[in-house]
Image (cartoon, rainbow, N blue to C red):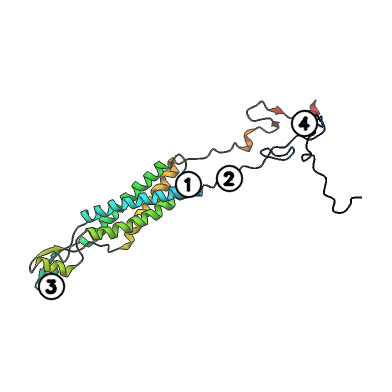
Amino acid sequence: MTVPNTPPEPARADVPAEPGAVPDPFAPPPVSAEEPPAGLPPAPPVAEHPLPDELKIGSGVVLACLLVGLVMAGLWAWLAPKVPLVVDGDRILYVDPEGEQRAGADAVFVLIGLGAGVLTALGAFLVTRKRGGGISVALGLAIGGLLGSIGAWKIGRWLGPSDNLIGEARRVGNGGHFDASIDLGALGALLVWPMAAMVVLLALSAAFGKREEDPPPYWGVPAGTYGPPGGEPTVVPTPEDRGQG
């Protein structure tokens, strides 16, 4: 019977070793903090979360698309056909009322966006081909392509002719000519870049993307045999063979 309030006996590991004491041969071996106890499976490795790396890749793709969008803005402001205007007294008239310059500006934006989509998708695929692109590359191209298109539209309008028609008419005077500002008549042109990038990335991934090794088929070993892979199979006698023997 244990007396109340009696402290528990110290564990075997807590008992200080007496000088000259013989170690107990039946004592269990000490367990280190790194190794699990005998009979227990080792602790599973801690899985590393690839989310930060995926975010870095996606952010890099978006940043690259924004830089390409700056180049696209300059090209659109330079190549887009201008709409010529003329000042006639207190009126501002089209020099060519039946001209197609407005539609031409949309067509030039679409063509440049198509080229930007192919360029960014090809670059992103080549950079991330060894590790596998993943969803971050696709999202980066979609978001970056849309933001790049919007930025190219806004900056291109700013780089092009002024949209202050009254001020430009006063500057050139009566009978003077000047160009109208460039703009998009169809905002659907902003989706050409991300859609082209998605199509090109899908095609490149399907044709040249990184692929995982297929597992060996379960029918790789003939029926009635067993054995380690790559070794000599052992023939298992069937009931018919036993009857013949």
Question: What numbered label is drawn on residue 53?
Answer: 1
Residue picked out by circle 2: 47
- Distance of mark 2 from mark 3, alpha carbons? 72 Å
Label 4 sits on a secondary structure element that is helix
Q: Which of marks 3 and 2 precedes in the sequence?
A: 2
**Neighbour tally class for label 2: few under 14, some 14-19, many 20 plus, Cα within 10 Å:** few
Whichever of callouts 1 and 4 sits on the residue coming sooner in the sequence is: 1
**Image position of 125 with respect to 185: above or below:** above
For mark 4, what is the residue? 240
Name the spot of residue 177 as percent of width and height, x first: 11, 64
Query: If you read the primary sequence from the N terminus, does the residue marked by circle 1 or circle 3 appear first?
Result: 1
- Residue 96 x/y as whole percent: 14, 64
Instruction: Measuring from the top left, give residue 217's x and y in whole percent.
Output: 60, 37
Residue 91 is labelled as: 3
Tell me which label, 2 or 1, sits earlier in the chain: 2
Comes first in the chain, label 4 or label 2: 2
Q: Secondary structure at mark 3?
A: strand
